Amino acid sequence: MKDRFDYILQALAGLLILFMVVSIFYLYVAVGRTWDLVAEALFSERVAQAIIVSVSSSTLVGLIAVAAVVPTAYVLTYKEFRFKGLLETLLIEFPQTFPPATVGLVYLLMLGPGSPINIAYTYPAILISKLYVATPFAMSFTIRRFREIHRSGLDTIARTLGCGTRHLLLWILLPLSVKDLAAGFSLTWARAMGEVAGTLIFAGAIPGLTETIPAVVLTSSSTPQVALAVSVIAAFLSIGALLFFKWIARER
Amino acid sequence: MMTELRIEEVTKRYGEVIALDRVSLNVQSEEFLVVMGPSGCGKTTLLLILLGVLKADSGHIYLDRNLIDNVSVENRNFGYVPQDFGLFPHMTAHDNIAFGLRVRNLPKADVERRVGELLSLVELQGMEQRRPAELSGGQRQRVALARAMAIQPSLLLLDEPLSNVDEATKSEIREKLKETVKRAGVTTICVLHDPGDALTLGDRIAVMYAGKILQIGTVQSLLEKPENEIVTRLLASHLFRWDERI
């Protein structure tokens, strides 16, 4: 007997899949016969520099995020305190909904020209604004895994065997979380690659110093071919990197 | 190693529910004591309090006359084998057994010697490089037992050691378990719900029901003189498989 509801679900799934895939790949259709422009843009100094700034800052942000979320996930898993739920919301969900432009503005006021420490329009400014927006991805993966391990009771067994916190972290929590840390890193990296508003406000778009790939797209809207070309490069980089990270995680 | 455990009037509440109601218990050195009762009777709570994972609301626990209420889990030196054996999935059988010794920073040669002794005690020579996923239920249990005994625990706590073992090999595993523990001479508390297993394994049995210990005694004394109706029914249940209907 044909299950009609099964077909309906497949058709509905198809709609979303089509929407998501077309949204990315229309870019390549739009480029059409202007592939020579893409090549030209790729070999221009400005774009090459933007790629270096984007990839290096996103990789650094991913590494800093993974290192920083480990102690935080430990505390949120093992310590009980008041307003823990609220703190978690502030660390995980809130940064994902807070407009990145506002984040940039906050940092500009806090660490900009008017404050004792002025790092506005520098490379560290990119790292800071990306870190705030992208860390929650690493955070949610790590905390979920630590809690899973805690529920399994493996940490209790380790403790009965005389294991202190240092060995618990190094021998149990981290080795059992490798895949989740890798997944957290790759999503953090991807989010950091795409972040633009906060970075633009706090770090600006100084070619060769603070101009990232999405900043090039945004600032070259008067020459759509360049914007399009850079977008193709950005999409290609991100998809390639994400597939690579997934492959690494599966190999482990 | 001579170790005696005394549990004195231990009470634990979860909100309105009393999980343990003034439980008192003495465990002699090298004794194999079984705490038997239906699920939900408080035996797991008792185990967690002994381990130091849970804190009792009142009452005390003494080990060789020393109060240990405030000794942390890692400093109690109690071996623990949970129901699912709790082997570290990312480590080989060898590394699981060596875990407690490495935590103690023992020299490598000592770790190897001790792990070798334990592997032969639980008859798992040749299996040391296998991961938990590559071992059978019975083998996993033996690795967990060896791991718990590696630290020369003052007390060994076993939580339903036979629940994850298939019926066909159960009686053999039961015999091996008791023999191994006896040979190591370690004081043991074993929590069980099945009266058949309890009667075979325990030197003495503490019958527990609704947070209370109803009677403690040898198999013979329990069977000959059960103190009340519930004890009789709990002990008889294995004959009729009533288990959870009490």
Image (cartoon, rainbow, N blue to C red):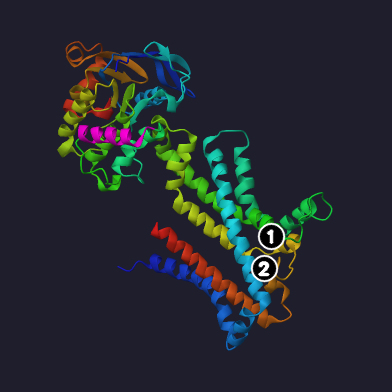
Which label belongs to residue A212? 2
Q: Amino acid at mark 2?
A: Thr
Name the foreground residue: B44 vs A167.
Answer: A167
- Write down the residue under mark 1: A126
**Vertical order, A129 against B148 (above or below):** below
Question: How many numbered marks, from 0 up?
Answer: 2
- The magenta span reads B106-122
How would you classify the magenta stretch by its main secondary structure? helix
- Which is nearer the N-term, disc 1 or disc 2? 1
Q: Quadrant of residue B53?
A: top left
- Quadrant of the frame with the N terminus of chain A: bottom left
Name the foreground residue: A93 vs A109.
Answer: A109
**Vertical order, A18 against B24 (above or below):** below
B126 relative to A235 in the view: left or right = left
Residue occupying the point 20% across, 26% down: B178
Residue B218 showing in the rendered view = yes
Q: Are marks 1 and 2 in contact (CB under 8 Å)?
A: yes
Judge whether residue B134 is colored magenta.
Answer: no
A155 relative to A43 in the view: left or right = left
Residue B159 showing in the rendered view = no
